[in-house]
Image: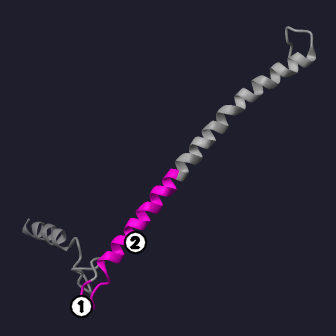
Amino acid sequence: MEYPCNSSATARAVAHKGATVAKAKPSQQKRARERARQERQKEKEQRRQESKARKAASGPRQVGDEDPDIAGIVPGPQKPLWEDEEDDTTSEDEAK
């Protein structure tokens, strides 16, 4: 690399100064990413605490209460989903 001044010390100082400026941007970006990550973690922790408080306030389910995740589900074999459509097409074919 050729510099206009004759002193090699000045050339090294100029080259070194340019290198430090280039490295400053990624570290600032890294700090910003880290701050954003910490904020997300705080928000998640707040949501967890709110959820825990809501669950504690509602109390345990009674023995006779139905589980809301499986409410209305009938145990045993289920009716095929496409049975109605197949019956309609076979009756039309038979009519021809």
Give the mark count: 2
- Tell me where residue 68 appears, x and y as whole percent: 27, 78
Element assignment for label 1:
loop
Where 93 sits versus 41, above or below?
below
Q: Quadrant of residue 24?
A: top right
Which residue in the protein does label 2 denote? Answer: 52
Question: Of the residues shown, which amino acid type is indicated by label 2?
Answer: Lys
Q: Residues within 10 Å of mark 2 (few under 14, many from 20)?
A: few
User: What stretch of residues is rendered in magenta?
Assistant: 39-66
> What kind of colouring is applied to the model shown?
one colour
Taking the spot 15% from the left edge, 67% from the top edge, the residue there is 89
Question: Seen in the image, is 82 located left or right of residue 26?
Answer: left
Q: Quadrant of the N terminus?
A: top right
- Viewer-nearest residue: 19 or 90: 19
Question: How far from the left and from the top, in percent, is residue 67?
Answer: 28, 82
The residue that appears at 49% across and 57% down in the rendered structure is 42
Q: Which is closer to the viewer, label 2 or label 1?
A: 2
Furthest residue to the left? 95
**Which residue is drawn at the image coordinates 21% and 80% (left, top)?**
72
Position of residue 52 measured from the top left corner of the image (x, y, whole percent): 40, 71
Nearer to the camera, 40 or 82: 40
Q: Name the residue located 11 percent from the left edge and 70 percent from the top edge.
A: 91
Label disc, if present, on residue 87 of the rendered structure: none
Residue 34 is a magenta residue? no
Q: Which residue is mark 1?
A: 64
Q: CA distance from mark 2 to mark 1?
A: 23 Å
> Who is closer to the viewer here, 35 or 78?
35
**Residue 94 position (above or below residue 42):** below
The image quarter containing residue 86 is bottom left
Question: What main secondary structure does the magenta stretch of the protein show?
Answer: helix
In the image, residue 60 lies in the stretch drawn in magenta: yes
Image location of residue 94, percent across then percent down: 11, 70
